[in-house]
């Protein structure tokens, strides 16, 4: 029985919340190229050619996986704007294993030498409308020196080694200074943490850019809708000049639709910008923070902020040429890109799909049980797992691939959390050893405060009929009896399939052999309390023992219910089991693992169960059951701290041996 004192001590420990790493491939762990488009027509042409498509709906957004030009890809429509691009790109990186990112879409031209229909591939992207808006054209100086805005957590942009002059709007009355000074964006990732850095430009991946330079795509002058019924082309839906592929230069993004010719000229004069749109720089920032290489292909639909909406612009949109040429370049790039990781010719299996192979997974139920494992085993990687308890949302892992799960207390929490981890595609648990490690109440006839009991049998005491003791037949010793039986002593049919289970004997014996002589923690308070039991194992120092565990969500206590626990264990194990510890979760945990095993996710034979005694399950001589329970729930027994410490001391012998001798354990349990 876990005590209420344990729950109270959890609050008192002030355990820090685990900072979680960004989750990865929550939906699918197959390596893919991620393709993001902002506008519906842009994505439609790619989706139409996708082979073996599968749709995934994530927070309302539709992501489609499949094969495109020999690569495994995932395609998503972000919607227009920086905020949508940021959100959807991060969602893609969270839910899929993305090797490279591609932005594919249309944009406005900035360089006046370029034409509608051209496809641009900038070598870097920036956000010029991330600004410090000053009151005039003078360099701002809020932090003392001119141009120093560092005290505000900002930095003015200096893409060419000097601050970019603010935009000035020309009007009939002369120049109007806006005071809009470009600034850099703060970016923090694993490589530059904890300081982070300020960036103006986000470079495109050099390898992807090199492939783009080699492309010779078949760019059309007339869009697909230019073809008339007689087979001829409608000249009104064709460009005057032949579209080109233009690689290099700076692309810029902002949360505005640019229809201002003066600002467009300003961007070209100050930044030599080639194209302007509303999404790519945001994708580039997310890619940089997540350290994922990217590239962007943008077909020019117009000259941003042009004085006139000319015939070429109309033809571009009406004929479907913008999206057709952009899609042609994206497809040509995929065809030319060489990557065995995303290539459909590379067979991907669960073992090599990037899923983390965990050697040992320790399963605790609440914070104080988990805490003794963290520092000794260097469990400093926190990985958020969907479906875990909101109190313990992260799995903690080490560089040695030992992980710690804290499920939350009780049957329901244990089953839900364990199943969530086993079904998470980021983890390969097929060869993992699972160790349930929690505190419990103990039968004084079998052990004492601080004792560590390895279980052979797991018995669920909660699946039963119950009649109030005041109303039961006088000949009965207890009001509890098996479901669909006539009374106590009759073994029920095991129709729930979770009533009783046995762990693997080879693993049990190995665990016992490794931990038998280990020195256990004790406390003066526990020594004084156990002395009141006078004789037997209860009065002896703590030891590593083997006896069996009983699970149920009711925190029972006393001699009569204790005798029922002994009898029930004997009944359900056909006399083979010996009751000694009482807890809440173990049958539920095992059942979740059994479901995962049926799905091929885990090996159920690799489960060990360890319970350490934080309290006795019945009173000492001269004490009532209520007084004994109160001592257990207030920490008066002194067993709580030794019990939690002994979990890692005893269980750690098994975990360390698994890691140190993984070449043997990987194949199965070594001989004792």
Image: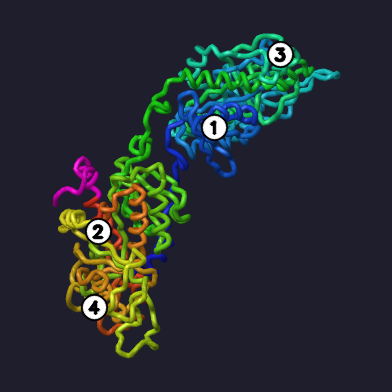
In the rendered image, residue 464 lying in the magenta stretch gets the answer no
Residue 456 found in image quarter: bottom left
Q: Identify the residue under disc 4.
A: 532
Decide which of tag 1 and tag 3 comes sooner along the chain. Answer: 1
User: Reading the chain from its start, which is encountered first: label 4 or label 1?
Assistant: 1
Q: Point out the tag, 3 or 4, that comes first from the N-terminus.
A: 3
Q: Residues within 10 Å of mark 3 (few under 14, many from 20)?
A: some
Task: Please provide percent x and percent y for residue 336.
Answer: 47, 17
- For residue 475, the mark is none
Answer above or below: position of 158 versus 149: above
- At a point 66% along the width and 19% down the height, the residue shown is 224
Q: Residues within 10 Å of mark 2 (few under 14, many from 20)?
A: some
Secondary element under disc 4, as helix, strand or loop, is helix
* Residue marked by disc 3: 233
Give the distance between the C-alpha atoms of the residues marked 3 and 4, in whole angstroms.
101 Å
Are dots 3 and 4 in contact, CB under 8 Å? no
Precedes in sequence: disc 2 or disc 3: 3
When asked about the image quadrant of residue 497, the answer is bottom left
* Magenta-colored span: 655-672
How far is mark 2 from mark 1, CA to CA? 46 Å
Residue sitting at x 67%, y 31%: 255
Q: Nearer the viewer, mark 2 or mark 4?
A: 2
Quarter residue 628 falls in: bottom left
Q: Which mark is residue 75?
A: 1
């Amino acid at each position: 029985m876990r005590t209420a004192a344990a729950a109270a001590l959890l609050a008192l420990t002030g355990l820090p919340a685990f900072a979680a790493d960004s989750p990865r491939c929550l939906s699918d762990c197959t390596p893919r190229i991620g393709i993001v488009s902002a506008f519906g027509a842009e994505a439609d042409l790619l989706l139409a050619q996708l082979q073996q498509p599968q749709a995934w709906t994530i927070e309302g957004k539709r992501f489609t996986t499949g094969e495109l030009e020999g690569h495994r890809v995932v395609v998503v429509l972000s919607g227009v704007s920086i905020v949508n691009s940021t959100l959807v790109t991060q969602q893609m990186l969270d839910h899929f294993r993305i090797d490279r990112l591609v932005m594919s879409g249309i944009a406005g031209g900035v360089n006046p030498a370029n034409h509608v229909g051209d496809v641009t591939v900038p070598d870097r992207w920036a956000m010029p409308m991330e600004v410090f808006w000053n009151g005039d054209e003078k360099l701002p100086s809020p932090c003392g020196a001119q141009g120093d805005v560092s005290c505000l957590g900002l930095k003015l942009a200096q893409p060419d080694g000097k601050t970019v002059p603010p935009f000035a709007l020309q009007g009939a009355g002369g120049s109007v200074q806006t005071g809009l000074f470009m600034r850099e964006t703060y970016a923090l990732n694993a490589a530059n943490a904890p300081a982070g850095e300020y960036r103006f430009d986000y470079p495109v991946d050099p390898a992807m850019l090199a492939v783009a330079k080699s492309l010779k795509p078949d760019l059309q002058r007339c869009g697909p809708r230019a073809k008339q019924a007689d087979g001829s082309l409608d000249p009104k839906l064709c460009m005057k000049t032949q579209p080109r592929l233009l690689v290099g230069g700076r692309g810029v993004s902002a949360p505005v639709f640019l229809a201002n010719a003066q600002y467009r000229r300003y961007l070209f004069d100050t930044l030599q910008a080639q194209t302007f749109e509303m999404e790519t720089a945001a994708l580039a920032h997310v890619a940089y923070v997540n350290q994922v290489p990217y590239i962007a292909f943008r077909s020019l639909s117009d000259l941003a902020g042009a004085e006139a909406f000319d015939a070429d612009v109309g033809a571009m949109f009406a004929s479907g040429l913008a999206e057709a040429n952009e899609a042609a370049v994206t497809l040509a790039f995929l065809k030319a890109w060489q990557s065995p990781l995303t290539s459909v010719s590379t067979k991907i299996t669960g073992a090599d799909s990037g899923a983390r192979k965990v050697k040992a997974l320790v399963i605790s139920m609440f914070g104080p049980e988990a805490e003794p494992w963290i520092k000794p085993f260097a469990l400093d990687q926190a990985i958020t797992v969907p479906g875990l308890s909101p109190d313990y949302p992260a799995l903690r892992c080490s560089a040695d691939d030992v992980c710690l799960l804290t499920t939350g207390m009780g049957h329901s929490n244990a089953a839900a959390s364990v199943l969530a981890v086993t079904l998470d595609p980021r983890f390969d648990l097929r060869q993992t050893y699972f160790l349930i490690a929690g505190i419990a109440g103990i039968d004084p006839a079998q052990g004492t405060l601080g004792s560590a009991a390895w279980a052979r049998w797991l018995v669920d005491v909660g699946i039963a009929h119950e009649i109030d003791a005041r109303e039961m037949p006088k000949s009965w010793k207890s009001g509890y009896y098996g479901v669909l039986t006539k009374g106590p002593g009759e073994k029920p049919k095991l129709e729930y399939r979770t009533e009783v289970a046995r762990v693997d004997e080879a693993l049990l014996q190995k665990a016992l052999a490794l931990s038998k002589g280990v020195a256990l923690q004790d406390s003066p308070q526990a020594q004084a309390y156990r002395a009141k039991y006078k004789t037997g194992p209860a009065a002896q120092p703590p030891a590593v023992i083997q006896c069996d565990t009983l699970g149920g969500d009711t925190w029972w206590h006393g001699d009569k219910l204790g005798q029922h626990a002994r009898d029930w264990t004997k009944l359900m194990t056909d006399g083979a089991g010996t009751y000694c510890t009482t807890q809440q979760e173990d049958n539920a945990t095992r059942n979740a693992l059994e479901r995962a095993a049926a799905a091929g996710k885990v090996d159920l034979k690799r489960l060990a169960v360890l319970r350490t005694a934080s309290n006795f399950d019945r009173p000492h001589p001269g004490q009532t059951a209520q007084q004994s329970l109160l001592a257990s729930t207030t920490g008066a027994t002194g067993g709580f701290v030794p019990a939690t410490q002994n979990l890692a001391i005893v269980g750690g012998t098994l975990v360390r041996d698994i890691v140190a001798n993984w070449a043997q354990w990987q194949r199965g349990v070594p001989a004792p």
